[in-house]
Amino acid sequence: VPKRGTSHDLVQMATENAVETLQALRTQWEADKSKQTQALSELQQALKLPNPPSRIECYDISNTQGTASVGSMVVFEQGTPAKNMYRHFNIKTVVGLDDFSSMEEVLTRRLKRWQASQEQHKVGEKIDPSFSVLPDLLIVDGGEGQLGRAVKVLADFGLSERIPVVGLAKQQEELFRPGIEQSLMLPRHSQA
């Protein structure tokens, strides 16, 4: 009959298991961080950005059964989703299904909120962190039409030189850049 371990032995075994688990989790986290850093670096090189984009905002327009349109903002910080920063915009000014105008409305509303966050605030007024910081890269879902509207909005706010923008066409995951006729396709094996 095997002897039962003492409570000291059980604590020691539990501690060793915990240390091993923490080491495994740390290794996994470091590997993921390495992939994120590599992805951001590859994105920087492919898009010829001055720095790796630490904050990326992605925008998409969805239509509910052909009637209501909603815009969504998805945020990545340091290459990982920042779900607490995600926002939805009910389309208010566009009649019918018009993805281009809807994209323009969403981006205009987002940048107006950024402008408001930069102005003097009343004491105790809460600032929404989703809107108080500008992205290092703005990605709009769609091709040249959506990209054209994003470029227009950035110009309207005087941010054309400050925020790089690309359009992402989903079918072949082509990236469209302002003023460059040829689309860019990242290699399938790329972390970016």
Image (cartoon, grey):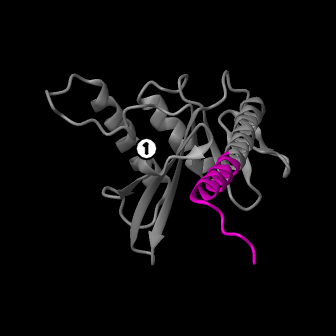
Q: Which residue is mark 1?
A: 107
The number of numbered discs placed on residues in the rendered structure image is: 1
Residue at horizontal 68 percent and vertical 50 percent from the top: 16
Q: Position of residue 145 (x, y in %)?
A: 59, 50
Q: Nearer the viewer, residue 122 or 82?
A: 82
Residue at horizontal 76 percent and vertical 36 percent from the top: 38
Residue at horizontal 25 percent and vertical 24 percent from the top: 119
Q: Magenta part of the protein: which range?
A: 1-22
Check disc 1: other Cα within 10 Å, few if <14, some if 14-19, many if 20+: many
Q: Nearer the viewer, residue 140 or 21?
A: 21
In the rendered image, which quarter contains the N terminus? bottom right
In the rendered image, which quarter contains the C terminus? top right
Q: Relative to residue 114, is residue 24 drawn left or right?
A: right
Q: Nearer the viewer, residue 24 or 53?
A: 24
Q: Quadrant of residue 92?
A: bottom left
Q: Nearer the viewer, residue 129 or 13?
A: 13
* Amino acid bearing label 1: Leu
Q: Secondary structure at mark 1?
A: helix
Dominant SS type (magenta): helix
Q: Relative to residue 177, is residue 100 drawn left or right?
A: left
Residue at horizontal 50 percent and vertical 46 percent from the top: 82
Q: Position of residue 115 (x, y in %)?
A: 32, 29
Q: Position of residue 117 (x, y in %)?
A: 29, 30
Q: Is 105 above or below relative to 52?
A: below
Magenta highlight on residue 11: yes
Find the residue positioned furthest to the left. Answer: 123
Q: Relative to residue 56, is residue 128 drawn left or right?
A: left
Q: Position of residue 181 (x, y in %)?
A: 75, 39
